Amino acid sequence: MIASEVGSTNTEPVHIRITSEKAPLINGRNMLQRLSNIFKIGRTSHSDGDGYVEFGTLGMDNTRTLGTFAGVFSPVTLSMFSALVFIRMGYIVGNAGLFVTLIQFIIAYGILLFTVASVCAISTNGAVEGGGAYFMISRTLGPEFGGSIGTLFFLANIVSSALCISGCAEGLVENFGPSGYLSGKIGLIPDGRWWRFLYCSILNTANLVVCLIGAAMFAKTSVAILAVVCICLASVFISFLTQGAIEISIPDANTLVQNVTEHVNGSYTGLLSSTLSNNLYSNYSADYSSGGTMTDFASVFGVLFSGVTGIMAGANMSGELKNPGRNIPRGTLSAVLFTFICYILLSILTAATTSRFLLQNNFMYMMPINMWPPFVAVGILTATFSAGLSNLIGSSRVLEALAKDNVFGMPTFNYFTWHTATIGLLGTLIMMFIINSIYASSSIILCLILIIVLHLFSPSKNAPWGSISQALIFHQVRKYLLMLDSRKDHVKFWRPQMLLMVACPRSACPLIDFVNDLKKGGLYVIGHVKVGKFNGQNNDPTIEEYPHWLSLVDHMRVKAFIELTVTKTVREGMQHLIRLSGMGAMKPNTIVLGFYDEETPKNFFLDSQYATTMFENSTTLPNNTVFPLRQATGEKNLDPVQYVGMCSDVLRMKKNLCLCRNFHLLNKAQLTKNSNLKYIDVWPVNFFQPTDQDPFDTTSLFMLQLACIINMVPSWKNLHLRVFHCETGGGNESLSISDSPNSMNEYPRISNEHRIRKSLNLLRISASIKKIPEWGEQIRGLKGRPLLEPKNQYESSTESNNALSNVSRAYILGVNQLIRQYSSQTATTFIYLPGPPASNTWDEDDMYRQYLQSLTELTVDLPPTILVHGVSAVTSTTL
């Protein structure tokens, strides 16, 4: 099979040796080839590269040889005749009566017809390879349904083959055993439970030999077998019309009516209206072949329906059919019609010629009335043996099916709608529960278990087969996205919807993983800006990179969408992604950026829990490198001014902003109960404006919300949430840091600590409050020289409320030292992010650089840190 034909990223032709559906089950290859030569069986094979290899060879000149009649009609007809046509008609008509029998055949064939319509629609939906039902179901419904239903279909074929072989063994005993019709009283073969088991084993061994030689052996001889069965069946029809009235003895095995003193006979009347009228209605009695078990509608229908369900025998031959899309519908539908006519005629003639007593007590009544009794014996043996062989071959082909991928078009079979498929499904389910509710429930439960197991663990779950599951998901997602109205957004069902901007995933793996935890059921988009000009390029460069980003998502096991864009600058690209990412009401509300610093990028794909080699030496990219890592001396795609401008753009676009620093230090494997890391810290203090602080503003509440969310994630649950309360000191009372120095002693106020504790309880956030008594010492640092001073008298008089004009560098370094003092056991820290300076007030570039420098000094040498600025309410305390 050519790798490029199945969607592989490897464009080099690689031939994969795959065992054929006709491959032997043992290694006796030479012996089987000699058997094939003895029987003159041509090996029907397939074109090179399609995934089928006969006896392990490759490169043979293989062709499809079977047409509609030999490949489909004959196997289906033989499977639908099986043991029912010669052995079970007396049981059905004798108990159910002619009317109920005809109704049961109509119901059974109605269900079969709707099912066949679905099979025909699938088989005409594109190129069909070997594997029959498994191939068609898996390529239409996906590997989960294909694998589960295919497994059940394989088991069902095995059981059906056993049923047919049992019928064949019964025919042998009834004809050649003790008191057999052809052997007389003595019997040519013994009877008994284990003797029948031996006969079935011998017949199965014969089937095994045929399967080992090759499926073509049965396909080539199916026409001859069908001719024999039709001749035997025709002799039965003729005998019904020509045979006069006779008495037929009841077999000795029927101990319900037979006794040793007087031999009991049943009457064959020939064509009589009185016999027909007596057999019109049902009269259920005990079944002598099952120890006297009483019959009813369900048991009779179970025998009838199980005998005519061989409709997939032709589809199982799909690998040898010249035109499966044409052969399967025509052959299957014609076989269904042919067998239906035969069964209806057989039922009517049986009811019009044979007494009910004889039908209920001698299921082999056709033999004594036949013009030459061995005709029936030959028909029983050939019909049941061929049906069992067909099921066994079909099951082996389903089990061994390995097929290439094809592009499916619209079905060409016109007599099919979802209504017919639904009727076929419901009809089959209803009859399953009518026949045996326990077996029906067990099969459905087993199917669901297989679907779940294959969905989770199957190597083929990502196979590019055009699974219908994606179409169903698309339909449901589109419908509910339209129902999700952004005008109905409310704080009560707010959830984080993250857009993480990533320059190089190699150095951002811990951050990508962290944001995946932080989004907690919300939208997660990973955005990347490829700097360059789109005009003048032959192809969109993001097309080649996009599959690698999807592979990154799979590798890291994060629930994220990927958005890529090409622009001249990173700042412009981020604006595009913020506006265009998501769909409908599912749009990012929080933008996450990495921190702009001089840290040397680390390649986490080499030696970490994210290590992988799947992104090395790619042949699909121009430089053969996926996600190239910037070197320590390499040039960055943006400067500090543009970075701060990006932060300003995010806030102007009314999005929450998070800046993440030092996440190269994060190792989630260390977040255990016995680890030294014990805390998630929250500092709801605007360190750039400490004298004008509201610990309950939008940003502070947003920080608490994010910290609470990350603490709910299983891998972070072992950590304890700490909220730091900064007090002025100088006494036991905790005063608001917004109080002026002159008003501190005028009258008592409610402490911020009490307000924080009350808010945490109201918001149901489990956290402890950590007092910072040293905060008063840090406040004195405000008396130092401001970070930014007015350059002239005009600027001084028009000074804005810029935060940097209120703090000194010594104060910033002191705050950093304070945070580090409490961070020795901290896994991650949430810090209040002041808004960027307003532009066009002083020199914008200097302001932006000083703002970034202040953030750098504030967070240097801290554990993984998230600087948070909120613009929208995220908590609600009302219903």
Image (cartoon, rainbow, N blue to C red):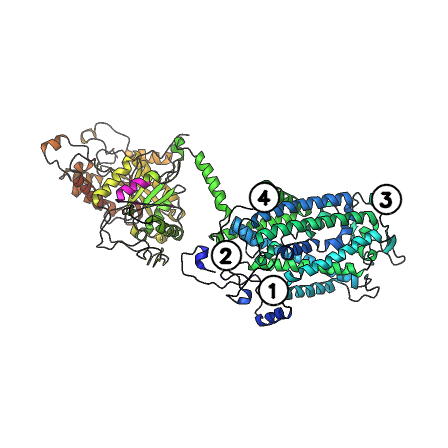
- Closest to the observer: 18 or 601? 18
Q: Secondary structure at mark 1?
A: loop
Mark 2 residue type:
Lys
Of the numbered discs 2 and 4, the one sitting upstream in the chain is 2
Query: Where 720 sits versus 37, above or below?
Result: above
Residue underneath mark 4 = 414
- Closest to the observer: 581 or 502? 581
Which residues are the magenta region?
558-577
Real-space Cα distance between discs 1 and 3? 52 Å
Residue underneath mark 3 = 274
Residue underneath mark 1 = 214
Q: Secondary structure at mark 3?
A: helix
Q: Position of residue 242 (x, y in %)?
A: 84, 53
Of the numbered discs 4 and 3, the one sitting upstream in the chain is 3
Q: Are marks 3 and 2 in contact (CB under 8 Å)?
A: no
Is residue 565 on the magenta stretch? yes
Residue 797, by quadrant, is: top left
Real-space Cα distance between discs 2 and 1? 21 Å
- Closest to the observer: 876 or 719? 876
Is residue 159 on the magenta stretch? no
Q: Residue at 55% of width from left, 53% of height from top?
A: 128
Q: Are marks 2 and 1 in contact (CB under 8 Å)?
A: no
For residue 404, the mark is: 2
- Closest to the observer: 705 or 301? 301
- In this picture, residue 175 sits left or right of residue 831: right
Of badges 2 and 4, nearer the viewer stands 4
Residue 239, by quadrant, is: bottom right
Q: Are marks 1 and 3 in contact (CB under 8 Å)?
A: no
Mark 4 residue type:
Asn
Real-space Cα distance between discs 3 and 2? 61 Å
Report the quarter where the C terminus lies: top left
Q: Residue furthest right?
A: 261
